Image (cartoon, grey):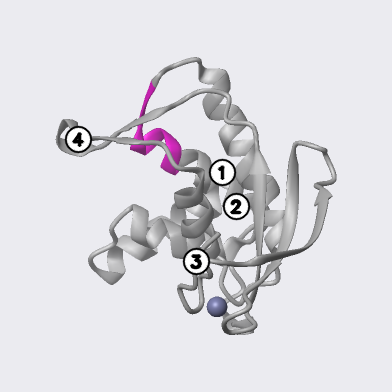
């Protein structure tokens, strides 16, 4: 497995154990080149899903892409990588249960939003601002107003940020 820090193509497995729900094997790896440490997950690929993007473009579904977009939305937030991984597994299970070979990107986006609102409201707003493509402050205000009415009690504490 290639080291994400230095690009070295070799890494050593330091620890290997199942996740809490036994749906995957979690491996701690270390890079002999730079000493960097990272985690990989081994899991069953149930079937191949294609993502339908705008303009009739198609690309293979990649779990990693969802994980990455959630990690970015949740960076420096009090949510750890296991929580993110569990949420991503939940999304993948929901996608698989749809039974469709092709899934619109917008469907995946809304499942990610549902997962984020449960994990962290700030991460949710960050993701939404990219996903919903806010262009002006009024777009953001309208979104926050909608959030207040749809999810009372989940308003962001702006002052605490
Ligand atoms: Zn390295």
Name the residue located 24 percent from the left edge and 68 percent from the top edge. Answer: 136
Q: Quadrant of residue 31?
A: bottom right
**Magenta stretch, residue numbers:** 102-109
Q: Which is more foreground, mark 2 or mark 3? A: 3
Sequence-wise, which precedes: disc 1 or disc 4? 4
What residue is pinned by disc 3?
9
**Disc on res. 101:** none
Q: For marks 2 and 3, give the CA distance.
A: 37 Å
Q: Which is more foreground, mark 1 or mark 4? A: 4
For ligand 1, tell me if the residue under mark 3 lies within 8 Å. Answer: no
Mark 4 neighbour density, 10 Å: few (under 14) some (14–19) many (20 or more)? few
Main SS of the magenta segment?
helix
Q: Quadrant of residue 46?
A: top right
Q: Position of residue 54 (x, y in %)?
A: 20, 38
Sequence-wise, which precedes: disc 3 or disc 4? 3
The image shows residue 153, relative to residue 157, as above or below, that is above
- Residue 143 is a magenta residue: no
Q: Position of residue 72 (x, y in %)?
A: 49, 66
- Residue 105 is a magenta residue: yes
The image shows residue 71, relative to residue 52, as above or below, that is below
What residue is pinned by disc 2?
117
Label 1, secondary structure: give it.
helix
Point out the residue furthest to the left here.
55
Mark 3 neighbour density, 10 Å: few (under 14) some (14–19) many (20 or more)? few
Whether the residues at callouts 2 and 3 have beta carbons within 8 Å, the answer is: no
Whether the residues at callouts 2 and 1 have beta carbons within 8 Å, the answer is: yes
């Amino acid at each position: 497995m290639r080291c994400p820090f230095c690009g070295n193509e070799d890494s050593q497995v330091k620890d290997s154990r199942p996740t809490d729900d036994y749906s995957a094997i979690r491996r701690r790896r270390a890079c002999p080149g730079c000493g960097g440490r990272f985690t990989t997950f081994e899991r069953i690929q149930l079937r191949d899903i294609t993502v339908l993007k705008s303009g009739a473009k198609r690309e293979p579904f990649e779990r990693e892409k969802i994980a990455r977009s959630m990690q970015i939305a949740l960076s420096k937030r009090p949510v750890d990588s296991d929580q993110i991984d569990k949420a991503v597994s939940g999304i993948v299970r929901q996608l698989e249960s749809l039974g469709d070979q092709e899934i619109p990107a917008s469907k995946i986006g809304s499942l990610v939003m549902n997962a984020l609102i449960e994990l962290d409201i700030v991460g949710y707003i960050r993701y939404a601002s990219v996903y919903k493509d806010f262009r002006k402050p009024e777009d953001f205000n309208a979104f926050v107003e909608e959030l207040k009415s749809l999810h009372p009690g989940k308003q962001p504490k702006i002052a605490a940020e």
